[in-house]
Image: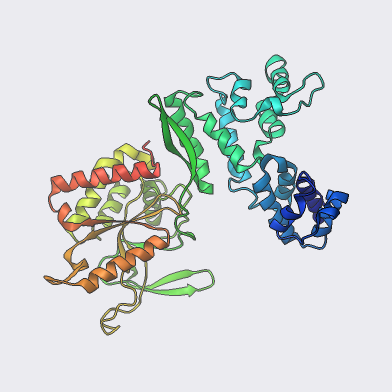
Amino acid sequence: MASINELIDAITLVLTEEKSYDLPTVCTRYGLESGDESEAFKSRRVYVQRRLKGKDQLFLLDLAKRVINDYGSKANTLAKLVLRLSPTGVFTISEITRRNIMDELYARNNIPGKYDLVEFLNRIWDLDSMPSTDSRFKTASGDIWQHMINNYDWDEIYLYEKYLELLTATDEVFIKFLEQVVHPLVRQQAEQNEYIEFINKHLVNDGYKFSLADNISGFPVYKIDKVLDGVKGNVKNLIFAAVGHKPEIVISDSINNDIKIVKHEENCLVYDRPIPNTGLYWADLVMWWANMHGIQEPNKDAEIALYKRLFSSLDSLPEKLMFKSYFRYFKELFDKNFPALVPQVYLHYDPYTIRQRAGKAYLPRQRMDFLLLFSNKQRIVLEIDGKQHYSDGDTSSPKKYAEMVQADRELKLNGYEVYRFGGYELTDEEIGSKVIKEFFEGLFKKHGVKSS
């Protein structure tokens, strides 16, 4: 029960900063029992505590998180306590992500960039309104100057993590700090790009990234934005590059969502390794392929063999042009960071054929032409439409077209990005290659995917 009492005291400390006549309204807003001003005027502390006593820890934790969000830096003590009681879910940008970013910043030894340290920190905090912890000085400006510049008896870890409490500060403060670290007034553009790249690598784990927001005299200004949530859940079974007869799949352990291919296993590939937050690279596929064939270290022969096996699963000339052009334009450019373009990926699986279903397909789109995984959540579907997508033979079929766009809607609502190419625009190799190159350049730019 000690933790509950601590939580009540910490919430009370924040809310009693309100005026007595405002306190009843504030408490009601947070779902607490109402009261009158006279009770609040007698003792604000007692007023709040009466309404918190008897509440269970889950209610108090939820309330505390709302108070932290509303009161920001005024609720720092409460934020630290909640972080101890509930290590997940206090902030959107987790302490692990913050620590990883800070460790990389310390290693570069140049957080203030072109600025004097105190000037830089004043871009984020109003140091002159923050009290000093040293009796010789009135404000935090004096503290920091004395201990970081004059004597240098603090290090950066103490300054940012203990004194300025960045690891437990609100998301708003931490984001403001990072935006100033990469501001064009603080850092030159080449270094700015380097910092943005490594910070984004960590932020993406919590659903954030730097995006271009503005220009000052031609210099880019970046802001941190929430990334679209993408697909919920993790990739568990990547079944792809099917040729010949459709594989027959059964669920071998429904609790663990484990599958087993019981027939025609030789006709498809199954990538059964976890997809990291950085996405699936071609190098990951090559390593998996090599290991599957008893090769410990991938070599050029293994890479060529995998390429040929994937290429053999493609049926149409436009699909083959897509695959060839992707490798031609981007393989060498991205090198180890080359995203894998996975062909013929099963999205749904129906063990029966359309004939066995008496002409009715319960799952209209069982395979995707191509899939890119920029992360476990950011999944990109590429479809190349031949006339079979919208016609029966040479006759236009509104029914087929409707099924296709319905399937697209469902994918998009589930967090996938879907891009369609008309087969006709990829029939001419020279023109089609240019279309493919420009598309991927735009896609990589949109998702912040950078070459080596």
Image coordinates for residue 341, horizontal then vertical, percent: 32, 52
Confirm whether residue 1 shows in the render: no
Residue located at (18% from left, 72% from top): 397
Location of residue 337 with respect to 118 vertically, above or below: below
Image coordinates for residue 225, horizontal then vertical, percent: 48, 43
Choose top left, top right, bottom left or bottom right for residue 28.
Answer: bottom right
Image coordinates for residue 260, horizontal then vertical, percent: 43, 71
Q: Quadrant where the N terminus lies?
A: bottom right
Location of residue 200 with respect to 87 vertically, above or below: above
Q: Nearer the viewer, residue 395 or 223?
A: 223
Confirm whether residue 95 shows in the render: yes
Left or right, 53 with respect to 289, comes to right
Image coordinates for residue 109, horizontal then vertical, percent: 57, 24
Location of residue 48 with respect to 169 vertically, above or below: below
Left or right, 401 with respect to 92, comes to left
Left or right, 193 with respect to 126, comes to left
Location of residue 378 with respect to 337 vertically, above or below: below
Residue located at (25% from left, 51% from top): 323
